[in-house]
Every structure is written in C-alpha cells, then in structure tokens.
Image (cartoon, rainbow, N blue to C red):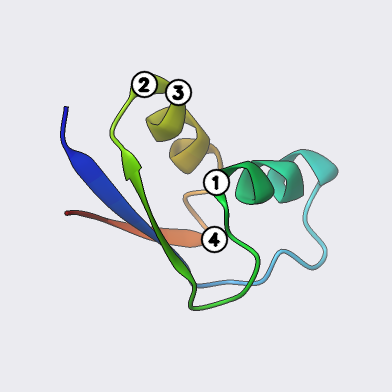
C-alpha cells in the first residue's frame, strides 16, 4: 500500500470528543501540521471520520 500525507486544516475546538481523539490518534495536534501514514484501511477510516478537518494527498 502507498503512503498518504494528512494535514490538519481546521481546528478541533467545538468538535466531538470522538473527532478530537481521532485527530490525536493520527498524530495531529496543530493546524498546519502534516503527518505521513501508510494507506491502511484503519488509517483511511480515521481520515474519513475527520475529512472536514483535514486535507489528504498521496505521498
């Protein structure tokens, strides 16, 4: 599987606890932070859950 770069583009203030924990599990803490992950089904599921807060591109 390939890699994906996930960038946080919106704040998690006012979001549900589940969405905040998902961002934390992805390794995102600040707006503008970029992390790289393998494109596994679990990672893609987490990204899909917070797709309104992040941008994704293939690495």
Marked residue nearer the N-terminal end (4 or 3)? 3
Residue under label 1: 26
Taking the spot 46% from the left edge, 60% from the top edge, the residue there is 54
Q: Position of residue 53 (x, y in %)?
A: 54, 60
Residue under label 3: 42
Taking the spot 83% from the left edge, 44% from the top edge, the residue there is 17
Disc 2 secondary structure class: helix
Of the 4 image quadrants, the one containing the C terminus is bottom left
> Label 4 crowding class (10 Å Cα cut-off): few <14, some 14-19, many 20+?
some
Q: Nearer the viewer, mark 4 or mark 1?
A: 1
Q: Quadrant of residue 15?
A: bottom right
Measured Cα–Cα span from mark 3 to mark 1: 10 Å
Q: Position of residue 32 (x, y in %)?
A: 48, 78
Vertical side of 59 occupied by 17: above or below: above
Of the 4 image quadrants, the one containing the N terminus is top left
* Marks 3 and 1 in Cβ contact (< 8 Å): no
> Label 1 crowding class (10 Å Cα cut-off): few <14, some 14-19, many 20+?
some
Marked residue nearer the N-terminal end (3 or 1)? 1
Disc 1 secondary structure class: helix
Taking the spot 57% from the left edge, 71% from the top edge, the residue there is 10
> Label 2 crowding class (10 Å Cα cut-off): few <14, some 14-19, many 20+?
few
Measured Cα–Cα span from mark 1 to mark 2: 13 Å
Measured Cα–Cα span from mark 4 to mark 2: 19 Å
Residue under label 4: 53
* Marks 4 and 2 in Cβ contact (< 8 Å): no
Q: How many marks?
A: 4
Please name whichever residue, 43 or 10, is drawn nearer the observer in this view of the structure.
Answer: 43
* Marks 4 and 3 in Cβ contact (< 8 Å): no
Disc 4 secondary structure class: loop
Measured Cα–Cα span from mark 2 to mark 3: 4 Å
């Amino acid at each position: 599987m390939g890699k994906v770069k996930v960038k946080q583009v919106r704040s998690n203030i006012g979001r549900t606890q589940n969405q905040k924990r998902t961002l934390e599990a992805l390794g995102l803490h600040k707006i503008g932070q970029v992390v790289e992950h393998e494109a596994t089904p679990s990672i893609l599921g987490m990204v899909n859950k917070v797709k309104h807060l992040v941008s994704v591109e293939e690495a």
